[in-house]
Amino acid sequence: MLPATRTSFSVSAIVGLVIGGIIGVILDIAGVPAGSAIGAFVGGLGAALFLYAERRRALIVGFVVGLFSFPVELLIYMGVFTLNLYTPPQVPEVTQDVLMIALVVTLIMQIAGGTIGGLLGGIIRHPPPGVVEAPRPSAPMSMLPPPPPRPEKYCIQCGAGLAKETAICPACGAKQPA
């Protein structure tokens, strides 16, 4: 079981895709230039913050959000259109070449936006370097062995913890007072 501050990669990616998809659709409907790329950026940032992992994993989750943000936004947009919540304006006819170029540019912008958002989220919030979280015990507390007893006295020379009846310190060999 994972600690409460960490989540799985897939859950973080889904959270980022939902956040980015909703924001991207709202910005696109509002007519904000590069609204879908901004949505992917926010989604990548949110996924990385939610993941709370080292920068490399945060960068990867941002990339995944950017990569899949276009189909997610398309699904949300189709749902909004199907429910008659929004009717897109009429646009002039464009050639298939121009449409393909626009699609490729949009995809590249979304992938870049999600990746940059993931990297920024990893920089903002990640575990400090070298910190390893202790795994939670899988057994109930009643089944775990008791902790070792605390030392009752300390060595007069080196400070090592000793049992009460110890006459000679096993760490440094110094004789202990009775």
Image (cartoon, helix red, strand yellow):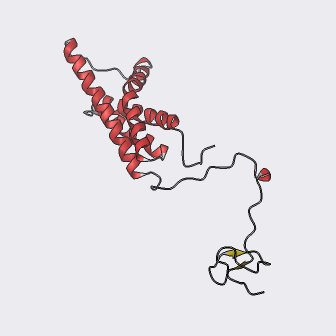
Residue 170, horizontal then vertical, whole percent: 69, 74
Left or right of 137: which side holds 41? left
Q: Residue furthest front?
A: 173
Specify the quadrant of the image occupied by residue 35.
top left
Q: Nearer the viewer, residue 154 or 177?
A: 177
Q: Nearer the viewer, residue 164 or 167?
A: 167
What residue do we see at 26% from left, 23% from top?
Answer: 104
What residue do we see at 37% from left, 40% from top?
Answer: 42
- With respect to residue 136, does 165 lie above or below? below
Residue 31, horizontal then vertical, whole percent: 27, 31
What residue do we see at 53% from left, 53% from top?
Answer: 132
- With respect to residue 128, does 82 lie above or below? above
Specify the quadrant of the image occupied by residue 61.
top left
Residue 130, horizontal then vertical, whole percent: 48, 56
- The quarter in which the N terminus is drawn is top right
- With respect to residue 122, does 172 lie above or below? below
Whether residue 84 is visible to the viewer of this picture, yes or no, is: yes
What residue do we see at 77% from left, 59% from top?
Answer: 146
- With respect to residue 151, does 25 lie above or below? above
Q: Nearer the viewer, residue 5 or 28?
A: 5
Q: Residue furthest bottom?
A: 177
Left or right of 5: which side holds 46? left
